[in-house]
Amino acid sequence: MRLSDFIVAHVDRIVDEWESFAKTIKPAADLMSSEELRDHSRAILLAAARDMKTAQTKSEQAAKAKGEELNKTPSLDQAAASHGELRHIVGFDLVQMTSEFRHLRASVIRLWVESLKEPELAYFTDMIRFNEAIDEALAESTAAYAEQVARSRDIFLAILGHDLRAPLQAVSMSADLLERKAKLDGASQTYLARIKSGTRHMGAMVSDLLEFVRSRLGATLPVERKHMDLAAACREAIEEACAGQPECNPVLSVHGDTRGQWDQGRINQLLQNLIGNALQHGSANQEISIRITGEDNNVELVVHNLGNPIDENAIGSIFDPLVRNPSAEQDVKGPSTSLGLGLFIVKEVVNAHGGSITVTSNVNDGTTFTVVLPKSI
């Protein structure tokens, strides 16, 4: 009997073996019903059998072996993906989930070989096609499982970021009240300034984390455009960034009309991250320069610092999330407060406003970020 026909004829027996093996996967299986243990196994097997009967050329077979998406079986992919999602929900880890496919492959081949009387050349083709179908199902299950893991992680980070805001706000407000009402000596004022600076850094990190999670969960960055002056916002951002840092020395130059229609909160995020990045990685004995130039239809923002340049191999990924430049870390002044999300947020804000951002970095000229923002939509 051909393997595809054998699977159809003995699908219940094969699924029984699937269930018996799934029962051994502890502790998740202890709380699962028979129906949950057998989850999508019958659909995967029958879809694999149908796939094996589908005509396939040598070139298609070679492409399939390379993982290319040729002649994929929708019903097989759907059943396998659903299986991967549900196995994640019930508590299987990735190794346990993939072990089910290893056992399924071995069970089917063993039962089929035991039923054969004499080998035929066509049987080798059947085994190849069966292995291809199981590999396809395994790939889809693994991808769906990984997607669920990533989504669960992102939801956890979103909850964490949201819940951290309340205690941070309480610390910040308490520090403000203490500063206004208490008579503090010089040392106490210094400690208070450190508390306020620390809460600002933590607040910025939480905001970056929430924006990152928002993008991961598929939500676009919302913007509410209002009339504002980029130069005025930059002055406020410099003052905020330099609070509690006497050595802070950015030099701002403004040219032309720097007013436009932008989201005030988002622009503040952009400025804080770019200025903070320059302060963090710029040389301690060199000033940071910020230039804002208003033109007819857009405003150009240039932030420049000297110091260790961004590694040439890292330039292409500098705006990717959770990426930090190793060479720049050698020249960081003080402990880093970065999650590797700052420049990612900057890029997202620029994109949301229909603008552009570029970066150049070398030993002689330093590092320069150039942002161009249209004044209106």
Image (cartoon, rainbow, N blue to C red):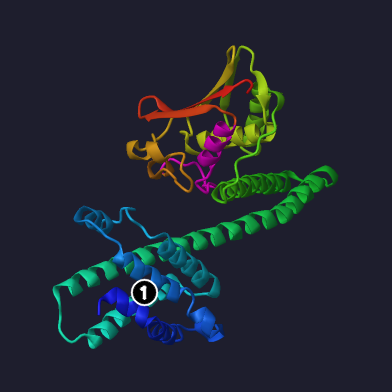
Magenta segment includes 194: no
Image quarter of residue 97: bottom left
Residue nearest the observer in this picture, 28 or 168: 28
Q: Is residue 163 above or below residue 340?
A: below
Image quarter of residue 365: top left
User: Badge 1: few (under 14), some or many (20 or more) residues near its Cα, within 10 Å?
Assistant: some
Residue 194 % position (x, y): 66, 46
Residue nearest the observer in this picture, 301 or 152: 152
Numbered circles on residues, count: 1
Magenta segment includes 334: yes
Quick one: SS at disc 1? helix
Q: Residue at x 39, y 30 (%)?
A: 361
Residue nearest the observer in this picture, 300 or 99: 99
Instruction: For the C terminus, give its image quadrant.
Output: top right
Instruction: For the N terminus, give its image quadrant.
Output: bottom left
Q: Which residues are magenta?
A: 330-352
Q: Is 290 left or right of 70, judged from the image as shown?
A: right
Q: Is 3 left or right of 361, judged from the image as shown?
A: left
Q: Is residue 185 visible?
A: yes
Residue 352 % position (x, y): 59, 33
Give the residue type at disc 1: Phe
Q: Is residue 110 above or below residue 326?
A: below
For label 1, the residue is 101
Q: Residue at x 60, y 42 (%)?
A: 220
